[in-house]
Image: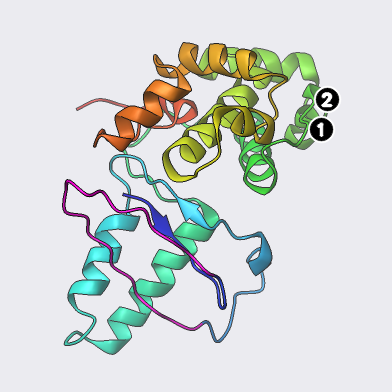
Amino acid sequence: GAILLCRPRQVDSFRWDPDRPTRHAFFHFSILDLPPDWPAPETWPLVRQPPDGDILRPMFRHILTWAEDGDAALRQAGMAHLLQAFVLGEISTRDVPVERLPEAVERALGLIRSAIERDPKSALALRALAEVACVTPEHLCRSFKRALGLSPLEAVRLARLDRAAVLLARSNFDVRQIADLCGFASPFHFSRRFKQAYGASPTALRQAIAEGATPPTPRLMVTRPFSRP
């Protein structure tokens, strides 16, 4: 279920399941030009673990289906859309939110997402989040509590745990290494927080995914308010 962006001269490897069929598909492309407002290519993520309802996997299947016989212009436009969604992280599709989150909350969440993407260990203080949100720390805390039911720093912790869940599913790092990479003081602290958020220990979640379970939806996304049909 993961989608990787392999760069030129990058070496990748795959661990195959000896008991179940595994599908591995790829699409090779070259980038001739980039929009000026895109982030630098060296900062692009290497892997995305799409949530339920994402656009990446359906678009990827569509491109592969018509790679040989389809319209070349449509294929190029689809690949550009797929790459942009992958790079910018705009990959989920859900019901239209009941209402938009407050602007201050959206700004702070944007900083949290970009900082964790660049470096999961990066320190994010409440004052820095408030500065980006253009409000006082007290106002930001009240806005987060009303909109998401948690504090800004709790949102930071969930973002780190979401990143840790991806590493558990798609890397060979052990739990101690993942705890350190995601900025937790100790493996014990990380495991306790992880189980609170995901309902399973890091080891149990990794085992379940290895046995075929679907990787869970990121916890920070679950806190977002969405309408129901």
Picture coordinates of residue 162 (x, y %)? 51, 32
Picture coordinates of residue 111 (x, y %)? 68, 39
Residue at image location 81% in from the left, 31% down from the top? 128
Question: Which residue is identified by label 1?
Answer: 131
Question: Which portion, as a residue range, is magenta?
Answer: 11-30
Q: Which mark is residue 127?
A: 2
* Amino acid type shown at disc 2: Arg
Q: How crowded is mark 2: few (under 14 residues within 10 Å), some or many (20 or more)?
A: some
Q: Residues within 10 Å of mark 1 (few under 14, many from 20)?
A: some
- Report if the CB atoms under discs 1 and 2 are less than 8 Å apart: yes
Residue at image location 39% in from the left, 14% down from the top? 199
Residue at image location 56% in from the left, 71% down from the top? 10
Picture coordinates of residue 101 (x, y %)? 52, 29
Q: Is 24 above or below relative to 7?
A: above
Q: In this view, does 89 lie to the left or right of 127?
A: left
Q: What colour scheme governs how the chains and residues are painted in the rendered image of this protein?
A: rainbow
Of marks 1 and 2, the one in the foreground: 2
Q: Is 7 above or below relative to 128?
A: below
Q: In this view, does 49 lie to the left or right of 141?
A: left
Name the quadrant containing residue 53. top left
Q: Main secondary structure of the magenta part?
A: loop
Q: Can residue 98 be seen in this view?
A: no
Q: Is 95 above or below relative to 16?
A: above
Q: Is mark 1 on a helix, strand or loop?
A: helix
